[in-house]
Image: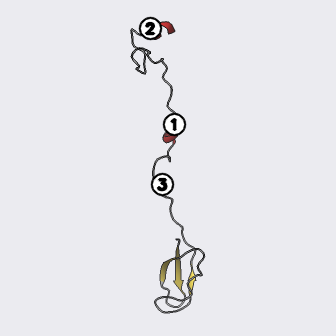
């Protein structure tokens, strides 16, 4: 529910009310009963929660430049790896 800010024309009281967007604006001041006007609100700030809000969250992992070693299963080829000798 949005928060609406009001000001009383009689006593200059400032107050806020939580109201549905479909509700009618408040007409009387809760302090003195005078006529009130609804002010233009400042709005609310955006709150970022969770992951996915930074460029680094979407960055793809760069593939390894060396092929994986088929014998050891390591991401980089071993010195004695036959796959490394074949690429030379």
The residue sitting at 55% across, 75% down in the picture is 20
The residue sitting at 46% across, 7% down in the picture is 85
Q: Which residue is mark 3?
A: 48
Q: Earlier in the sequence, mark 2 or mark 1?
A: 1
The residue sitting at 46% across, 10% down in the picture is 84
**Residue 14: where, in percent of width, then height?**
48, 81
Mark 2 vs mark 3: in front: 2
| Crowd band around label 1 with a 10 angstrom C-alpha radius: few (<14), some (14–19), many (20+) | few
Mark 2 vs mark 1: in front: 2
Q: Which residue is mark 2?
A: 82
Vertical arrangement, residue 1 with respect to residue 15, above or below: above
**Residue 76: where, in percent of width, then height?**
42, 19
Secondary structure found at label 1: loop
Q: Is residue 16 visible?
A: yes
Q: Earlier in the sequence, mark 3 or mark 1?
A: 3
**Residue 44: where, in percent of width, then height?**
51, 65
| Crowd band around label 3 with a 10 angstrom C-alpha radius: few (<14), some (14–19), many (20+) | few
Q: Is residue 88 visible?
A: no
Vertical arrangement, residue 41 with respect to residue 46, above or below: below
**Residue 6: where, in percent of width, then height?**
53, 80
The image quadrant of residue 82 is: top left
Looking at this view, name the residue that lies furthest to the front: 71
Question: Quick check: 39 left or right of 81?
Answer: right
Secondary structure found at label 3: loop
The residue sitting at 51% across, 36% down in the picture is 59
Alpha-carbon distance for marks 2 and 1? 32 Å
Alpha-carbon distance for marks 2 and 3? 49 Å
Q: Which residue is mark 1?
A: 59
The image quadrant of residue 72 is: top left
């Amino acid at each position: 529910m949005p928060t609406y800010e009001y000001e009383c024309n009689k006593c200059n009281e400032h107050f806020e009310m939580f109201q549905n967007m479909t509700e009618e604006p408040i007409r009387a001041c809760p302090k003195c009963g005078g006529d009130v006007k609804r002010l233009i609100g400042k709005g609310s700030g955006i709150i970022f929660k969770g992951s996915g809000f930074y460029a680094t969250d979407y960055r793809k992992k760069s593939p390894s430049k060396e092929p994986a070693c088929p014998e050891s299963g390591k991401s980089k080829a071993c010195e004695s790896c036959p796959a490394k000798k074949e690429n030379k």
